[in-house]
Amino acid sequence: MRKFTLLLCIATLIGCADTKNTETADTLNITFSTPAEMWEETLPLGNGSLGAMPDGGITKETLVLNEETMWSGCEWDASNPDALKFLPEIRKKLIEGDNLAAQDLMQQHFTCTGNGGENPKYGCYQTLGKFVIDFSEMFGTDTAFTDYNRYLSLNNAVANTSFSFNYNGKPAKFHREYFVSIPQNVIVIKLETENAPLKFSMDFQRGNSRTDFSKTDSTMVMQGILDSGDEQKDGVRFYTKAKIIKQSKNQAVIMIAAATDYKKIIDNQEHKDFATIQNNVQKSLDDAAKIDYDNLKNSHICEYKKYFDRVEVAIDNSETQSADSAALYLQFGRYLFICSSVNATLPPNLQGIWADALHTAWNGDYHLNINVQMNHWPMEPGNLSDLSEPITRYVEGIVPSGEQTAKTFYGTGGWAGHVLANAWHFTAPAENPTWGATFTGGAWIALQLWEHYQFTKDKAYLTRVYPILKGAAEFLRANLFEYQGFLVTGPSTSPENAFLKDGKRCCVCAGPVMDTQICQEIFGAVCEAAEVLGIDGDYINTLKNTALRLPPMKISPKGYLQEWMEDYEEIEPTHRHVSHLFGLYPGTTINTPELYEAARQTLQRRGDEGTGWSRAWKINFWARLGDGNHAYKLFKNLMHPVTTTKCAPDQWGNTVSYSGSGAGTFKNMFCSHPPFQIDGNFGGSAGLMEMLLQSHEVKANGTRIIKILPAIPDCWQSGHFKGLRARGGITVDCEWKDGKIVSTNIDNPLNEKIEVVQGR
């Protein structure tokens, strides 16, 4: 095994060969002792808009570049004009118990036009390309190296590579430093040699026929147009420029800037040429070039640390007699969220902002049946509430499309989102109802905005998003229908699981339990929001009366929580989605001893494996159940090293093959679905915070319960955290030793009514 190190990690969990231990909060590093051999070993840098992943190569340094708005496709009307007239018949079949017939009708008549995610119009998040710096002339035929060190500092959002080599028979050193400036919006690369002249050439690479390249002695340009999927429309234009800002015999500073005209397209503005984005790129380079390198670096670090330094976590593991990797993983999730959200136009997608292929897995899009929501789970408890603007704007942007979907497919008001969503405001049912029919995605993502209010108590924000919450609730209320004496959703599914019906595989049903839980949550959120704002009294009564007619959750005779109203036989009892436990986390409707026990039985039946993000979700489930040992077991499963080999690109451009299930963690700490999918990183980070602090419970009198260390494992004997956030604008610090809390500090600036519960 080639050596690599994760500082503050447990070697046995992730396969490290030469782990170093440190407990100081300012040394959160991900460190390798060799260059990257595949993309999943490179180091992610970003500023919300731009992403860069250097590989630390010896004779060639390759940085995979990203720009957050590099989306092919376009906005298009996916409405199916025939869908609505088949809706009554589909529901009739469900009421009669003929789910298979309902599913067949949906497949034939109740899907979007143009095959949804498979349609080129739908689009795909793409890599910007590669930037290659070639040092072959400097090295010649002697490429031996020693003392290699490559690391990413989570504390500073700066990466470094250094090594020693021979130059003309004499010892020499090479040091490279990289960061993506938050204030200046440029990628910065510093090259520095000692006892050897610095010689290099540089090049852009992108495997696309609609990309043009040009260069001078000190600059390089890459520009092109992405495919819109519509012969009548041009797609997104992009423009990228690299420039050598400073060069001497032993040192050079290179800067890269990039931009697209995505926002102009979304805003229906002219985008006939490259002039505007070219000017934006040039201005970014010119402004950054005026700043001394050290000042440029320090201003970036200062801006980044305004976010990152709000939280500090250190945990000692009694099993290993060392610092626990959980602290590093928790902070890595916060790091990735900052670097994919600060100054961003769009929220992080399935790739965050880091992709290495023109066709990313699952189009790199926004799945509303858990994935984009999971991307935001660490935002609020991780003290990053002020990075909520990208997701807020995104949800505001999909509402008009969602209103059209509600009208054309269901004949109702409000707005709807299904499973598939993307940068082009797609909200329609997908091309296959067995996984794409779930229509509570809009309400679920709206609840993320409600969470932001819960944590901040920002009344102006609540006023802004209240119409979104109400529209999502109204769509669901208007689409409930009578079934077995209750009001249920349908046609829908329990993502993305299937059951046996008359001996055949079926997914479409009436009233999947997750849908009912989401109805309860969104109805409750709208009622509470309206009361805070002093509006919509009559509508509150309507929602409350409707909620009383929702079906109760059922516990199977075998003890687990039923996933469907009928206790269908699951085709895959260990399915990666555990959708019917939405009410446990992130929801709050599973809240009685009987339901907690049913949830526990459900999780035991589902098992502790699953895809990367599934394991992350289960950490949160077990934390809510107060079982720190089981939550920690899931964390160790999430950290399982993914065994990979390099291979030819697959259909998505991925260059890795996986042994076994392939789920777990890559060597650069990216989560593996497989392939890489960033929601597991975010979900795992949030789960670790949930083990340390919980604030979701509210008593009947309005008192919020703050649980400190509600679910830590036995092996976390000592540690501390500072700066984690609880709902109500509350910040909590805690120190514990020998399994017992020795000090806490609670900052409650809004004077919320709280009750503090300490320990398990």
Image: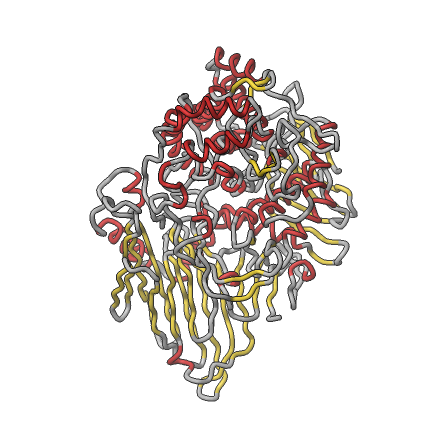
| Side of 660 relative to 189 (left or right) | right
Residue 224, relative to residue 558: is it above or below?
below
Residue 8: x and y, percent? 64, 58
Residue 495, relative to residue 238: is it above or below?
above
Of residues 216 and 286, which is closer to you in this image? 216
> Which residue ends up furthest to the front in the rendered image?
502
> Which residue ends up furthest to the top in the rendered image?
538
- Can the viewer see residue 475? yes
At 60% from the left and 26% from the top, the residue drawn is: 751
Colour basis:
secondary structure
Residue 336: x and y, percent? 51, 50
- Can the viewer see residue 619? no
Residue 213: x and y, percent? 27, 64
Quadrant in the picture for the C terminus: top right
| Side of 66 relative to 729 (left or right) | left
Residue 591, relative to residue 384: is it above or below?
above
Residue 632: x and y, percent? 70, 48
At 33% from the left and 56% from the top, the residue drawn is: 257
Residue 95, relative to residue 105: is it above or below?
above
| Side of 16 relative to 93 (left or right) | right
Of residues 370 and 87, which is closer to you in this image? 87
Of residues 99 and 346, which is closer to you in this image? 99
- Give the number of callouts: 0
| Side of 673 relative to 424 (left or right) | right
At 48% from the left and 26% from the top, the residue drawn is: 90
Q: Which quadrant holds residue 138?
A: bottom left
Quadrant in the picture for the N terminus: bottom right
